[in-house]
Amino acid sequence: MKNVLIIGCGRIAGLNEDDPFRKKPCSHIGAYLSNPAFDVKGVYDIQQEASETFANKFGIKGRYQDIGKALSDIKPELVSIAVPYEFNSEIVQTVAQHINRPKMIFCEKPIANSLQSAEEMVRVCRENEVLFYINNRRLTEIYMKLEKIFQSDLEGDAITVNAWCSSGLHAVGIHMIDLLRKIFGDVDWVKATLEEETVQSLPYSDNYTIEDPRVNAQIAFKNGIIGNFINTALTAFTYFEMEILCRKGKIRVSDNGNVLELFKTKTPSTSTLSYSLDKKKIFKPRNNKTLFTKIAEELADAEYDGLEHPLSAKHGLESYRILDALVRSSDNKTVVSINS
Ligand SMILES: NC(=O)c1ccc[n+]([C@@H]2O[C@H](COP(=O)([O-])OP(=O)(O)OC[C@H]3O[C@@H](n4cnc5c(N)ncnc54)[C@H](O)[C@@H]3O)[C@@H](O)[C@H]2O)c1
């Protein structure tokens, strides 16, 4: 069994388990408690009351006011970090350089709040031989299925992609950027315009802040595909959707990421109007495994953190590089090339 220390005792660390709209497990502790490979030995939060409440709620013995003491006592194999992302860098560096550093760190997205700290975090973990993972949506059933069908039914032959999501780039957009990288590969350049309208807060996005930028952008991939990416805080509803237009049809994720629809060309007759798309095929996730169930399975067997690993922090860093380029492009009103 892997001893686990959880840092940050808020919603995604565990309190989301009380939300009846979410399929369970839907949090760090939910994932570890439902997988026999893990034993959560302790929790730490900067607010003592938060760690006490959390530990009592989930029956965890260790509750700490100091990260160093927690690491020395527990000697965890896995440290799971779920704090506001501006603190990720400091915490990851403290944990990775500690004498009782864990074999691996799993940290919430976005990896950091600046490209420089993201690079530093990856460097420090590499130098201290700590496997470093960042949460993302690569293991989501619907996006795994989308990629499979895109390759098999539509021959991976995309013309363009439209991707839309609500909230801000750090709060939600980074997930879409990462999925676009997963499907289309490395990015060549970006061109973005900032969404100017001030939005103070969003009822459906707890981690959105007024400072979090939103963009309307073009993203050009090294494979020649140029896609459109819109991340806006102006809708009154939450959404996260993508549509890939291909030579022989199109595939889209609709219903806020819950439904996958495939449209293929039909066999044409003599009418020009018959050169159209057939009735759509609908796929819904079977929901037998939530994202956090899959994450726990990946972490239970984790032996490396190269780019082939779906949770590798290297993806977290490369996706943050695109986020940073989008912001620079919109600030300077220029096309920004990506040099990773
Ligand atoms: N992967 C996802 O889909 C997803 C979803 C929600 C949130 N997140 C990310 O998870 C992180 C946490 O979000 P949340 O909604 O759980 O926030 P939250 O506010 O509910 O919880 C954060 C907790 O961290 C504690 N904290 C703050 N600073 C700390 C520090 N320096 N050291 C230790 N503890 C500290 C707070 O006291 C709080 O209890 C954010 O970075 C967010 O981007 C990811």
Image (cartoon, grey):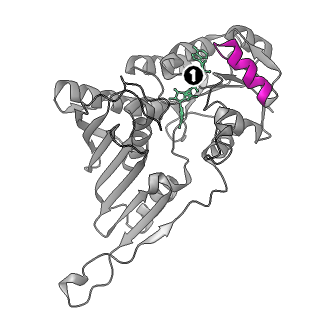
Q: Where does residue 75 sit, x and y in percent of width and height? A: 76, 18
Residue 241 against residue 337 in the figure, above or below: below
Along the viewing direction, whichever of 84 and 326 lies nearer the viewer: 84
Tell me what residue is drawn at x 63 percent, y 56 percent.
287
Q: Where does residue 245 sit, x and y in percent of width and height? A: 30, 61
The residue indicated by pointer 1 is 83
Q: Residues within 10 Å of mark 1 (few under 14, many from 20)?
A: many
Tell me what residue is drawn at x 30 percent, y 44 percent.
229
Q: Amino acid at mark 1?
A: Val
Q: Where does residue 166 sit, x and y in percent of width and height? A: 39, 41
Q: Secondary structure at mark 1?
A: loop
Q: Main secondary structure of the magenta part?
A: helix
Tell me the quarter of the picture where residue 199 sits. top left
Along the viewing direction, whichever of 258 and 42 lies nearer the viewer: 258
**Is 182 contained in the magenta span?**
no
Tell me what residue is drawn at x 42 percent, y 69 percent.
153
Tell me the quarter of the picture where residue 268 sits. bottom left
The magenta region covers: 45-57
Tell me what residue is drawn at x 51 percent, y 66 percent.
283
Along the viewing direction, whichever of 307 and 115 lies nearer the viewer: 115
The N terminus sits in image quarter: top right
The C terminus sits in image quarter: top left
Quadrant location, ligand no. 1: top right
